[in-house]
């Protein structure tokens, strides 16, 4: 599962030789994230986000396990135990804010990782399985984040749970029984809170397992790179360690600085004030909004306002919201262009940036109240979202004339550094 | 096959969204959404500056103690502070003896069980107790307050946008209903028993103005107790009750970011060093 020139694990210490014979775990690590994994030498900073997502997952698991030690999954005490964690547990405020801010940073990193994949065509053959598993991780993350947001049992927790499980209520005939079954009652209550806590604890470990599959699937063809040209020989690659461990170390530092700024100086900036009000089934908040990372999908959900003959608008919205994520699973077969990287696809690139702006607009509308003009704007933006992936992208890949590709990764790198007369270059490896 | 299916699905969703847009746009033009009285007359919180503003701000302990005094003498008659314990007052500069005395002399007693008979009873709070609630339950609270339940104040400044300024603005924001409002929205007259306040979400608040006259509270430190001063002080106190670890958090943040900047700088140099031979022309 690697290039023939990959460095071989040769333990020198007799203890390590003994371990390697009995259980070649160090060998596995060496081949996965050590010197035994050859990686294209031209990765830019956008290739840092996979490792950063792993770091974010670890931060969430560590802070989450500590928080769980102080949390009571019962509607009578949940809100109060979270407050006690904030006030009376040593560094409890740090764990709680790190967990809440960490969730946002996890999504920021994963969204950048996904858009990296979209721009550089990382989803294309032979890496389709990497993309598909990544989407599974994304879906698991969304479920985990949603259930985690319910746990503090604030107003947005309660009403968010009600709205999101209400989506299943839109399914004809079986919808309402499904909603009741999911909640363990007719409205969010103790049964819902308990199962959400249980699943919120379980799913991160499922995510970790799928991350292992994701990396395994990646290591079979090896990492893609900004040119999209496949590795041709040893001169195109460098060992993951120390080259990319060093680069990821720097990336992790920058990530942690940004994380610390928000965590220590604006921990509630990305949250909603209503979640500091204890859940009250008798008082509906003026605007029920999910966390920011769900806003684009929430905008798509609310964009459907007109019934399609016998199909109610609400059901259409639910179908479209799920479709907006599920369509990404078909992306490797919708984009048939042989050229991977957006850098060599002039038409694709323009539409890619329109998509980015479109998703940002959807996000803004999703966080705004369900009133005009936001609904009209999100209708146009959602129409573009579907048209982009399902209509425009297949057409571009058929008719676009790509720019000439470099012959190899090394050629592309040398073209970049060729004019420097051997001087070290201040620009980081791109 | 995949692409044909995708094309049809895309056509359906995009097409129906555009039709929905047209329907909405026609409705928007023919029947523009009515302007609500809240939309027109609700005001964002006033600008007010506190010692804890900004990333390096800290609490002014004298102000917190004054704010606590306002809470004790005015707010606590109706509002609970259930997530704060007497022992927490150490955080605003009281010593153990003072806290013991404050708890012992607190006007509201802590519910307890008589150790001899097992009957429900009350006793004076001790430092370990949380601030006792002024009403036995929500029904009692609503009955005593024109059917509105006074909310718990522990987290109030985090439960509203710009919470500290919001508390200050709300307390100082009571005013007669503007004439233009009644002219434009004749049905929006403030109902009997409510009080007009443009800083409140729906403009009419069950709470009567709590601070009505200068000198309502007599400050021990000689600060002139104007309504504005008392409102600022209690807003500062409630910022502390909502986020008692604010100063620890900012201090820890400074140390963490200082450490991370150095570590990241070293990591960058290591990265450049390791890559030096790969970034030259061959």
Image (tube, coloured by chain):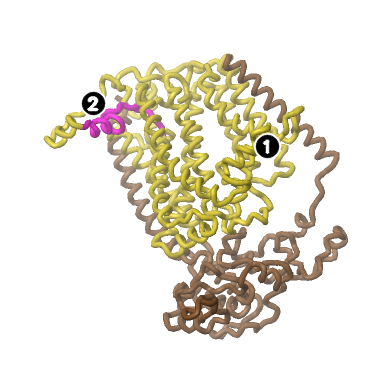
Chain colours: A yellow, B brown
Task: State how far apart marks 1 and 2 are (Cα).
Answer: 52 Å
Mark 1 neighbour density, 10 Å: few (under 14) some (14–19) many (20 or more): many
Mark 1 or mark 2: whose residue is earlier in sequence: 2
Task: Relative to A272, say whether B111 is above or below.
Answer: below
Image position, residue B3 (x, y; %): 59, 17
Identify the residue position indicated by label 1 in the image. A378
* Residue B75 can be seen in this image: yes
Mark 2 neighbour density, 10 Å: few (under 14) some (14–19) many (20 or more): some
Image position, residue A158 (x, y; %): 59, 51
Comparing A374 with B121, the one in front is B121
Magenta-span inclusion, residue B226:
no
Comparing B273 with B193, the one in front is B193
Q: How many marks?
A: 2
Quadrant in the rendering for residue A392: top right
- On screen, residue A326 versus residue B198, left or right, reads left
Identify the residue position indicated by label 2 in the image. A7
Chain bearing tag 2 is: A
Magenta-span inclusion, residue A29:
yes
Task: Relative to B175, say whether A290 is above or below.
Answer: above
- On screen, residue B70 versus residue A215, left or right, reads right
Comparing A387 with A213, the one in front is A213
Establish whether labels 1 and 2 are both on one chain: yes
The residue at the point 47 percent across, 29 percent down is A117
Residue at the farthest left position: A14
Magenta-colored span: A23-44
Marks 1 and 2 in Cβ contact (< 8 Å): no
């Amino acid at each position: 599962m690697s290039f023939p020139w990959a460095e071989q694990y040769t333990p020198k210490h007799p203890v390590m030789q003994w371990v390697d014979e009995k259980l070649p775990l160090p060998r596995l690590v060496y081949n996965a994230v050590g010197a035994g994994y050859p990686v294209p030498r031209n990765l830019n900073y956008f290739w840092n986000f996979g490792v950063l997502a792993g770091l974010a997952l670890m931060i969430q698991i560590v802070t989450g396990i500590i928080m769980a030690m102080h949390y009571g999954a019962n509607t009578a005490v949940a809100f109060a135990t979270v407050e006690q964690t904030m006030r009376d547990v040593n560094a409890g405020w740090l764990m709680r804010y790190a967990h809440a801010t960490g969730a946002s940073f996890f999504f920021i990193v994963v969204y950048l990782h996904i858009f990296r994949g979209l721009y550089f065509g990382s989803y294309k053959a032979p890496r389709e399985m990497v993309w598909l598993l990544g989407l599974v991780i994304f879906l698991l993350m969304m479920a985990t984040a949603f259930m985690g947001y319910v746990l503090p049992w604030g107003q947005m927790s309660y009403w968010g749970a009600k709205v999101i499980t209400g989506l299943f209520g839109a399914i004809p005939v079986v919808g309402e029984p499904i909603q009741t079954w999911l909640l363990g009652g007719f409205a969010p209550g103790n049964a819902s809170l308990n199962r959400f806590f249980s699943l919120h604890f379980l799913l991160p470990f499922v995510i970790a397992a799928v991350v292992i599959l994701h990396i395994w699937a990646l290591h079979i063809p090896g990492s893609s790179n900004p040119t999209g040209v496949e590795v041709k020989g040893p001169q195109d690659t460098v060992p993951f360690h120390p080259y990319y461990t060093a680069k990821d170390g720097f990336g992790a530092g920058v990530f942690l600085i940004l994380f610390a700024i928000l965590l220590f100086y604006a921990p509630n900036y990305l949250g909603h004030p209503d979640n500091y009000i204890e859940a009250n089934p008798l008082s509906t908040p003026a605007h029920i909004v999910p966390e920011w990372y769900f806003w684009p999908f929430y905008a798509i959900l609310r964009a459907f306002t007109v019934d399609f003959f016998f199909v109610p608008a609400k059901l259409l919205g639910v179908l479209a919201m799920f479709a907006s994520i599920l369509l990404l699973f078909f992306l490797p077969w919708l984009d048939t262009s042989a050229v991977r990287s957006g850098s060599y696809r002039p038409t694709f690139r323009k539409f890619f940036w329109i998509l980015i702006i479109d998703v940002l607009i959807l996000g803004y509308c999703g966080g705004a109240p369900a009133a005009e003009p936001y609904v009209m704007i999100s209708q146009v933006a959602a129409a573009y979202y579907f048209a982009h992936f399902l209509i425009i992208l297949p057409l571009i890949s058929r008719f676009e004339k790509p720019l000439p590709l470099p012959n190899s990764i090394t050629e592309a790198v040398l073209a970049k550094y060729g004019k420097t007369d051997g001087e070290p270059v201040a620009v980081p490896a791109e | 096959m995949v692409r044909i299916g995708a094309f049809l699905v895309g056509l359906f969703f995009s097409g129906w969204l555009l039709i929905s847009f047209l329907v909405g746009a026609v409705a928007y033009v023919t029947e523009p959404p009515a302007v609500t009285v809240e939309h027109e007359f609700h005001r964002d919180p006033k600008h007010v500056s506190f010692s804890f503003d900004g990333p390096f701000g800290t609490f002014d302990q004298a102000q917190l103690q004054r704010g606590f005094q306002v809470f004790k003498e005015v707010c606590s008659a109706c509002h609970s502070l259930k997530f704060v314990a007497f022992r927490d007052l150490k955080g605003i500069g009281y010593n153990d003896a003072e806290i013991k005395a404050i708890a012992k002399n607190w006007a509201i007693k802590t519910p307890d069980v008589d150790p001899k008979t097992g009957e429900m009873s009350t006793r004076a709070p001790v430092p370990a107790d949380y601030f006792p609630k002024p009403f036995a339950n929500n029904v009692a609270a609503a009955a005593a307050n024109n059917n509105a339940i006074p909310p718990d104040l522990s987290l109030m400044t985090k439960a509203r946008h710009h919470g500290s300024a919001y508390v200050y603005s709300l307390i100082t924001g009571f005013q007669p209903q503007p004439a233009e409002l009644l002219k434009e929205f004749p049905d929006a007259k403030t109902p009997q028993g409510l009080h007009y306040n443009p800083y409140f979400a729906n403009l009419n608040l069950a709470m009567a103005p709590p601070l009505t006259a200068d000198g309502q509270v007599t400050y021990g430190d000689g600060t002139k107790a104007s309504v504005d001063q008392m409102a600022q002080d209690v807003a500062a106190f409630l910022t502390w009750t909502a986020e008692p670890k604010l100063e620890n958090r900012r201090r820890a943040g400074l140390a963490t970011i200082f450490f991370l900047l150095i570590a990241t700088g070293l990591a960058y140099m290591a990265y450049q060093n390791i890559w030096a031979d790969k970034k030259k022309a061959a």
